[in-house]
Image: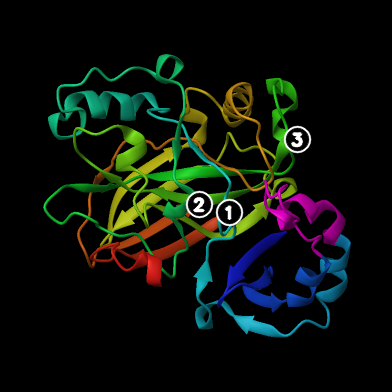
Amino acid sequence: MRLCRFDDDRLGVVLEDGGLADVPEVLARVPPKRWPDLAGDPLIAALPQLRPAIDGLLDRAPRRRLSEVRLESPVPRPGKVIAAPVNYLAHLEEVRRDPQIHRSRRIAEIHEAGLFLKASSSVVGPARGPAVPFPDRRTDHEIELAAVIGRRVRNVPPQHALACVAGYLVALDMTVRGPEERSLRKSFDGATVLGPWLVTADGIPDPGALELRLWCDGELRQHASTADMVIDVAGLVALASRWYTLEPGDVLLTGTPEGVGPVRPGSRLVAEITGIGRFETVVRAGAEDEADA
């Protein structure tokens, strides 16, 4: 199943014919969150119970065209955005070669570097698009496979880790180059673009056999397979769960392959992962207006 969020928080199902079924009635069945237990995304947490209701609505649901709607992030505000640095060897070598990226810092391999967190306020959908917050500094695109956690879990072993994933997304991890720590340079408003929809885990039998492609203004810049990851999705979920309690709706970015490069306001990015889909988005001039958007 492919679930999307569009046009100011409407819920839709993307159909095999490329159309969109509008199913807002499902949201009324999502259990409410009560203070102080506000952790986790309630829709993602309830998804296994809601799927029969969603299936039952498809035949009579109003149809929309994808070209007519604004696609938002399928997960509007993750509790955590967890990211894996240099999880492709070719990208590690690329970083070490480019002084504009490494800036004379020692770049550790992922087994040593571990994971890092991005601000949940950095998340936007393809319709909003990424931002260049500091026009005088280099800002790069990084396409990544994103896994969305489906249930609360701690210390899960790798052999059981994929059972904790609700689904997968295409992600852009936008990065300002500079001397600051990764978490700061990758957490500005508009730094994390998620979309175009959530493909539930049963639709991705092997997340380690997906092709990633990113075009910038028509030029293919990134092309790799998730088979090239140093630590696979199961290993990353297991690693993250040793450090954090994972909650429904937490997003795990699994790393970017080689080919990262700078963007500017007006750059048109197309991000695609086989089995999930593709989205097109345009880089904006700044992030100063995000709080009022």
Q: Which residue is mark 2?
A: 170
In this orientation, which residue lies closer to the viewer: 242 or 69? 242
Q: Amino acid at mark 1?
A: Ile
Q: Amino acid at mark 2?
A: Val
Task: Describe residue 87's horizontal placement relative to residue 242 as left or right.
Answer: left
- Of tags 3 and 1, the one toward the viewer is 3
- Cα gap from disc 2 to disc 1, whole angstroms: 7 Å
Indicate the position of residue 249 as horizontal and vertical percent values. Answer: 64, 48
Q: Earlier in the sequence, mark 3 or mark 2?
A: 3
Q: Residue at x 36, y 56 (%)?
A: 189
Numbered circle sitting on residue 276: 1
3 and 2 marks in contact (CB < 8 Å): no
Q: Residue at x 88, y 71 (%)?
A: 56
Whether residue 274 appears in this view of the structure is no
Task: Describe residue 120's horizontal placement relative to residue 248 as left or right.
Answer: left
Mark 1 Cα within 10 Å, few/some/many (few <14, many 20+)? Answer: many
Going by the picture, which residue comes out furthest to the left? 136
Q: Residue at x 76, y 55 (%)?
A: 34
SS under mark 1 = loop
User: Which residue range is magenta in the image?
Assistant: 30-51
2 and 1 marks in contact (CB < 8 Å): yes
Q: Identify whether 247 is placed above or below 53.
A: above
Task: Describe residue 17's horizontal placement relative to residue 131 as left or right.
Answer: right
Rendering quarter of residue 150: top right
- Of tags 2 and 1, the one toward the viewer is 2
Mark 2 Cα within 10 Å, few/some/many (few <14, many 20+)? Answer: many
Q: Is residue 36 magenta?
A: yes
Rendering quarter of residue 292: bottom left
Q: Which residue is mark 3?
A: 163
